[in-house]
Image (cartoon, grey):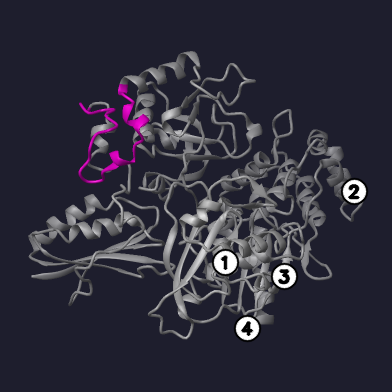
Amino acid sequence: MKNIRFDFTCSRQVPLYAHLCNQYLHYDALNINIGCDGQNNVGQHSYFIEALGEQAQLEQLADAIATDFLISAWLIDSSIKVIDEHQGSKTLLSYPQSDSNQALTPFCQHCYPLIGDNQSAKFGALDLACPYCKGETLLTPAQKALTLSDIHAMVQDLLTQGLSTQNLPTQDLPTQVTLTLAAADNLQLSLTPFNESLGGRPQLLICNPNTLNAHFCLNDVQVLALSSIEKPFICARPTQEHDKLNAPLYEICFAYSRVTLVLAEVLRQKGIDWIYIQGQYQRPQLAWIDGAWAQICSEGVDSVAVQNLIAPEPLRETVIFHGYQAQWQASKRSRSRLQQGELSVVALPHTPKVKSFTVESDYFESNNIESTDFESAVVKEITDFDDNDTENHTIADAALFSALLNGKFTSHKPAKNAAVIYLSHSHASQIVTCDSKGDTELFFALPELPDNGYEIFHQLDNSPQNAVAQKFKHLFPGDYLTLLSLKLHGRRDNLQSLWAIAAILMGLNHQEETQSQEWLSDALMAAAMRYHGANAPRIDYPLTKGEAHRSLNWCKTLGSLLSFRIAGNDDPSQLAFAMQDSLADYLANWLEHIDLNIGVHNIALAGNELVNETLCKRISLRLGKNFPLVINRSLDVDGNNLAVGALYVKQRRLNSHA
């Protein structure tokens, strides 16, 4: 007889794993105990199943578990080991959907071959009842009414006639073949790219996973993530010189519902490997940060609210911040020096905005939020936050405190001796420090760049970089004219804007017209991903000291980039990589300087610019060797984490309205 323990360590809650552990309590052949180390904590959750039995029985159990525990993007380790005694129990594990009969996944390994395989007699039977995952319960009446013949007819229209059932998104492009699936959240599909003026990275549904590597440069962890139960979007680079995929980067996903599963298989039979998609299909967008996946933003993602996480007492119990509402409620059994309680955060419904504040009154009633909480939250949102104030670091503070919930806060110690590198194209990109008293200070903020190419070149030409600027104008007249036609929109105090300018300066805008800043930024990131050399030039990122905080001398940064190109470096991938690597090196130097002054025990990483694969790798390499890097993977890196962190932000005006 042996005692065996099966462990599944995850970076956040995985409801399906909790559900499966509960199911194995009914495994009659063996005495089973279950549990979860870190249950309801912020951070890692280790689900486990323990069994006592003979070798043959345990081997059968291992085979069953291997079949049932489908890969999760949040799974960071799994193991089997012999134990001396049980640590688990017969108590059911709780998870967000455990009180309802809602299915946790639209299809599983049992029903997938029946519904999604064109050789199956049940192929296309969307409403097929599955006793294991109960995925049919997630279907709307309209989806249940769809037949295989309906899907075949829609695909035929898509391929031959370009029929749009409703809401053609590009009415000014009558040649675009577009299909809108009203039964699938108005999912729009097209064989050609959607109108780029809509913004954002092109998104693709992969119809033929077997040809994935023929179209995209992917590693094993990316392929596993695409296949995971979460079916996320990941950022992928197409193979070089691809004849159809002309954008620098794409967001790609596998079929994520029963409708898209059958639709993708029918398209695959027609020879379609991938198709452009657009709509409210609510897929999580993941980024690989310091060795594991993290979710960028949960706004619009089809998932339950983060809830019942144990966290220390904040400065305020309710806050509404940038589309999310976070709440903390004291725990009656807390015995620690810091009062512990339960934390929850949810994305608010989309409603008309009042000065960047969004809310639905009946939402608060249905969630038992007092009207006084509602009013104080409104006051906080409107009076205390000005994202255009260069001295305001509330958002970076919130990112720091929410990240530290994964570290010091859960060790019952106040947040102190830490820093956050917050890089975002949605808010101000900043570095904020937290000293031994827990007080925060803005150390660095990226400057706001000019909004047009004329002004950018004018400032270069009137700086100490004027010599290289004039040489650039003379040697690369085409790129010079492209720069003059550049228009930057929205926020410009971010890396995206800097990358867009740099992409033009290194000759990455190959088209006749000047591309958008999103496209140009992606072009620089894609070029950096192509570089596999050992050495790269060092690009300058000199600091400027303002009255209150430091910023970047961006003219010198771009001037140093131009000097390498003018000197004959004609490899844009090396220069693009150099910009990422040099920035990571400068960040490491700045943080070492901060460490000498206040002592830095943890460095938090946050912000949606972390989707930049190369920069994340270089930051891990340059910073990670000297400092512990903290990413709170239980929350977003640029979404609900900000609302959670805002509960802990020290701000007198915020407190005065609480």
Magenta-colored stretch includes residue 653: no
Q: Earlier in the sequence, mark 3 or mark 1?
A: 3
**What amino acid does circle 4 point to?**
Ser
Kindly state the secondary structure of the residue where label 1 is placed: helix
Work out how far the residue at label 4 is from the one at label 2, CA to CA, in angstroms: 44 Å
Q: Which residue is mark 4?
A: 436
Q: Are marks 2 and 3 in contact (CB under 8 Å)?
A: no
The residue segment tinted magenta is: 120-148
Q: Is residue 275 left or right of residue 564?
A: left
Work out how far the residue at label 4 is from the one at label 1, CA to CA, in angstroms: 19 Å
Magenta-colored stretch includes residue 127: yes
Kindly state the secondary structure of the residue where label 4 is placed: loop
**What amino acid does circle 3 point to?**
Phe
**What amino acid does circle 1 point to?**
Gly
**What amino acid does circle 2 point to?**
Asp
Q: Earlier in the sequence, mark 2 or mark 1?
A: 2
Residue furthest toward the right?
462
Residue 443's disc is 3
Q: Are marks 4 and 1 in contact (CB under 8 Å)?
A: no
Q: Which residue is mark 1?
A: 645
